[in-house]
Every structure is written in structure tokens, then in C-alpha cells.
Image (tube, grey):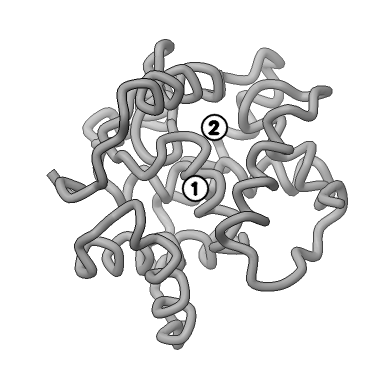
Amino acid sequence: MLFSNVLPWPKLALAGCLLLIAGTAWTQPQDPAERAALTAYLKEALHRDDSFQDRFDAEVWLTDMSARLASIIREPEQRLALLRSVHREAKAADLPPELVLALIQVESYFDRFAISSVGAQGLMQVMPFWKNEIGRPSDNLTDMDTNLRYGCQILQFYLKREKGNMRRALARYNGSLGKNWYPDRVFRAWKKRWYNGQLHYSGIY
């Protein structure tokens, strides 16, 4: 297990987290046109191997974020492996890695084996139906890199659809468009643990 050294939680905290995971898993778009557009976007993105090269010198970022993640994942090598993958996939999707970390904290609390009550899987709680939808049924959503690639590209699709409004993009990701509870939860996690500068998107402040 990748995160075998995650700190143990009290029973009440664990129960609360399981409820949180069950409540934040996003579902498939109800609008057929939107679903078709997202399917095409995701299918193309997951086949662009050259788009996922880490071309950034992120040592300062890795050191900073590793310290912030240490209370959740004890093992330094595990932290760095996760952070490198988050940084790579977030940048490939033109997303702030810190916001992706906040989303992961809300969705799975960094448990890559997390499964919601509706079947969403992994770090970013991706629904398995997308694998068949885009013709990749053998993809493993508990694999860190695979899950992050799906999740980041899906969020980027919604961010483009919402013309840069991150609040609405996050609500779409969660399946709660028109409500603020989910974006607010992600923004709180970002501000409390991952903040390292302003996010230049509409709908945040």
C-alpha cells in the first residue's frame, strides 16, 4: 500500500471522513452534449503522452509542500512521489498544484484506495464509468498517476467550460453546480494548509 504510514485517525474522525468522501464524489454529467464533450476531451488528454512530461524545476515547491503534508503522510519518499505526480499532472492540465492538493484532501484525505458510497475511486474520487466511456477499461483508478491524470483533466475541462470560474468548475466536478458548499470546502482546505500565493481565477474570493 502506497500510504501505509498515514497517521491513524480516531474513530470519530474516520467516520466523518468516510461521510465526507461519500458526500463529495461527483457523478456523470446529465446533459448528453456535455457528457459527449467531456468524453472526447478526456479521451484525447489521456492519450497525449508527451503532454505529461515534468519540465519544471519544482524542488523548492516539493520541499515546501512535503513539510505541509508530513502530518498526513509520514514517509518522506511517499510524500515526494505523490507531490511529484500532483505537480506534473496539475501542470499538464494547467491547474495550480496547490488547489489540486486541497481537492484531494477534501475528496479522499490522500487515501488512493478510497471508495465512495457511489463507487468513486482514488485520490480524486473518479467514477469508474469513465474508463469504458473513453475506451480504457483496464485503467486502474487506484494507481496514483492514473487517478490524478483523470481528475486533473476533468477539472480542467470544467474550468474551460466555466470560462475560468473556479468555483463553478469545482461545483461541476462535484456534481453540485449552483451550490457553494463544495467549492467552499476546497477553498478552506487550500487556505488553511496549501496556500502559497493568490489564485488568479474568478469565483474564489
Question: Relative to residue 19, is residue 143 drawn left or right?
Answer: left
The residue depicted at 80 percent of the width and 65 percent of the height is 200
165 relative to 78 in the view: left or right: right
Q: Position of residue 11 (x, y in %)?
A: 31, 22
Residue 142 found in image quarter = top left
174 left or right of 183 in image: left
Q: Which residue is mark 1?
A: 44
Q: Crowdedness of circle 1 by 10 Å Cα count: few (<14), some, many (20+)?
A: few
* Quadrant of the rendering where the N terminus is positioned: top left
Residue type at numbered disc 2: Thr
Residues under labels 2 and 1: Cα distance? Answer: 9 Å
Residue at 55% across, 44% down: 103
Label 2 SS: helix
Q: Which residue does the numbered mark 2 point to in the structure image?
A: 39
- State the residue in front, 105 or 84: 105
Dividing the picture into quadrants, the one containing residue 123 is top left
Residue at 62% across / 32% down in the picture?
173
What percent of the width, then of the height, locates residue 23?
54, 18
In the picture provided, is 168 more to the left or to the right than 79?
right
Type of the residue with mark 1:
Glu
